[in-house]
Amino acid sequence: MAVSDDKERYMLTIEKSLKHKLQKIADLDNKKLGAYINAILERHVVAFERELYDTYGSDDFLVNYNAIFGLEHVPHLKYNKTELDVLVEKFLNNQ
């Protein structure tokens, strides 16, 4: 199966019992296992970004985010549009 340009294939080795449990949970959520694991990983990234935001506040979040992930990545953390616009503007003005 072809992978779209915005995705990357990654092989993961996990314990059989963990895979079985994840599959059961994914089935209950009406998701394919890969989509379910992707959602778990995305929630983990959002939790990390939230911790960054809570630690550094709106003034320094993007500076610290970009120091870790680089300018080519956009936060998964959801902001209201106004707050995100303010953060980006502050960051760009400090460059």
Image: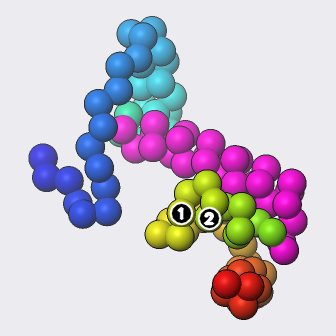
Residue toward you, 34 or 91:
91
At x 77%, y 54%, the residue is 52
Task: Check if residue 45 falls in the magenta segment.
Answer: yes
User: Which residue bears the numbered disc 2?
Assistant: 66
Q: Position of residue 42 (x, y in %)?
A: 55, 48
Q: Position of residue 55 (x, y in %)?
A: 86, 54
Q: Which residues are magenta?
A: 34-59
Residue toward you, 62 or 86:
62
Horizontal side of residue 74 vs 59, given as left or right: left
At x 71%, y 61%, the residue is 64
For the residues marked 2 and 1, what is the alpha-carbon distance in whole angstroms? 4 Å
Task: Check if residue 47 falls in the magenta segment.
Answer: yes
Tag 2, which secondary structure? helix
Horizontal side of residue 91 vs 28, given as left or right: right
Horizontal side of residue 47 vs 39, given as left or right: right
As shown in the figure, which amino acid type bears the numbered disc 2? Asn
- The image quadrant of residue 10 is top left
As shown in the figure, which amino acid type bears the numbered disc 1? Gly
Is residue 30 visible to the viewer in this orientation of the structure? no
At x 74%, y 85%, the residue is 94
User: Which residue bears the numbered disc 1?
Assistant: 70
